[in-house]
Image (cartoon, rainbow, N blue to C red):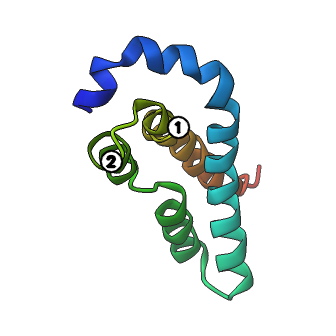
Amino acid sequence: MIAVAKEWSALLDSFASVGVAVIAFNVVSLVVGYVCSRWAGLDKAMATAVSFEIGIHNSTLAIFIALSVLDNFQLALPAAIYSVSMYFTATLFGLALRRKGRVAAPV
């Protein structure tokens, strides 16, 4: 979080070039995790848990490796964008799954 806060302006600047791909990767990860889990016979609750596990990756480790080991800030940008955006996309995905599971009450 400190690295993200420190380089917030660079993060916003690079969002235009990698933001769409990073968000698409996150959404695809969530959907594939859920669909494959359901195909494997898991119930909705377990499939949701698996999709969140797949969709919310450990970006902190990727940022650490890029900054400390590789000493390259540019390599940390996609992971930093992912770490910020994954919580929004995962929340929307979870809300969509909840809404999909609701059945209208008979009138």
Q: Residue at x 70, y 54 (%)?
A: 28
40 relative position to 14: left or right? right
Please name the amino acid that badge 2 sits on: Thr
Q: Position of residue 61 (x, y in %)?
A: 33, 53
Q: Farthest residue to the bottom: give it.
A: 41
Q: Which residue is mark 2?
A: 60
The mark tally for this picture is 2
Give SS at disc 1.
Answer: helix
- Residue drawn at (74%, 82%), measured in percent from left and top? 39
Q: Residue at x 47, y 65 (%)?
A: 53
- Lower position in the chain sequence, tag 2 or tag 1: 2
Give the class, few, some or many, for how many residues have Cα within 10 Å of label 1's Cα (few <14, many ≥20).
many
The dot on residue 78 is 1
| Residue sitting nearer the eye, 16 or 50 | 16
Left or right: 66, with 94 as reference point: left
Label 2 secondary element:
helix
